[in-house]
Image (cartoon, helix red, strand yellow):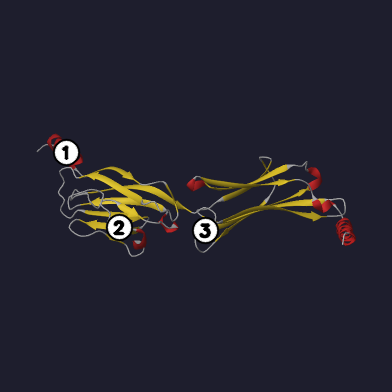
Amino acid sequence: MDHWQMFAFFFVGSFFKDIWAINIKDVRIPKVVREGTEEPIILDCNYEMGTSSNTGLTIKWHIGPKVLYQWVQGSPPRASEEFHKYVDVSYKASNNSNTMYRAVKLVRPGLELSGNYRCVVWTHDDEVEEEERMVVYSPENYFTIHQDYKSTDESNCELIVTCLAKGLSPLPTITLRKDMEEILQQKAVIPRADGRYEVKSVAVMDAKRLRPPVTFKCEIHIQDANYTNFKEVVYSGCDARLPRTFFLAAIFAVLILFAGNQ
């Protein structure tokens, strides 16, 4: 066999192998999922066997380097010990004996299920795989914005606007705005042992430079989940401008009035 015949032999062989090999048509994985959602999450690896033998047919789902789920044809599907609480192994994607347990049904997903998912289809003759990413996010479980006043003297005061959000994941951002414009602020991001974050932003301003009413808006955002939420507070004036003697006199006057009516 000369060189041209050998080239043609291998070219044609490779061509037909690609045509008849196992083919993953598509991998369907939601891009963003809320932690603990009651809606079932289906990870589907839709493939065709072509003319490949199904001898040893095995489907594996990985999340990062870890095995999530495995089905060997002729045996019941199994979830890994680490993730079994999230997997409904009774779910069937089809009634075809070659594909019935190709998909994974997740229930009430936790944050640890964020990651890159890889579907591997394997037989003694062939092996193919595809990968997609899914983010499991947690919105805040506590969110507040409030304003405080600090008197520097009897005629001046500082306005302190504080925003705090807790329980977010993955990594969030926090921004304070005054009438839609971002303002000078100090920000803190605190990671927690459970994989969630606390974020805080504080802005201190000279109240004399403000013209009430002023709307302060605090926005939290999780870029990976395309999640945004906000709260607002309206500044109407700095009560701290009034000296303490004014409030004492006002209270005293009310008490006198009340006593006179008895």
Q: Which residue is mark 1?
A: 16
Residue plotted at (60% across, 47% down): 230
Give the secondary structure at mark 1.
helix
Answer with left or right where residue 155 lies relative to residue 224.
Answer: right
Label 1, label 2: how many angstroms apart (C-alpha)? Answer: 31 Å
The number of callouts visible is: 3
Answer with left or right where residue 7 lies relative to residue 162.
Answer: left
Mark 1–mark 2 contact, CB under 8 Å?
Answer: no
Label 3, label 1: how many angstroms apart (C-alpha)? Answer: 51 Å
Give the secondary structure at mark 3.
loop
Label 3, label 2: how many angstroms apart (C-alpha)? Answer: 26 Å
Give the secondary structure at mark 2.
strand
Q: Which residue is mark 2?
A: 69
Residue plotted at (27% across, 45% down): 46
Crowding at mark 3 (Cα within 10 Å: few <14, some 14-19, many 20+): many
Residue 242 % position (x, y): 85, 52
Q: Which residue is mark 3?
A: 196
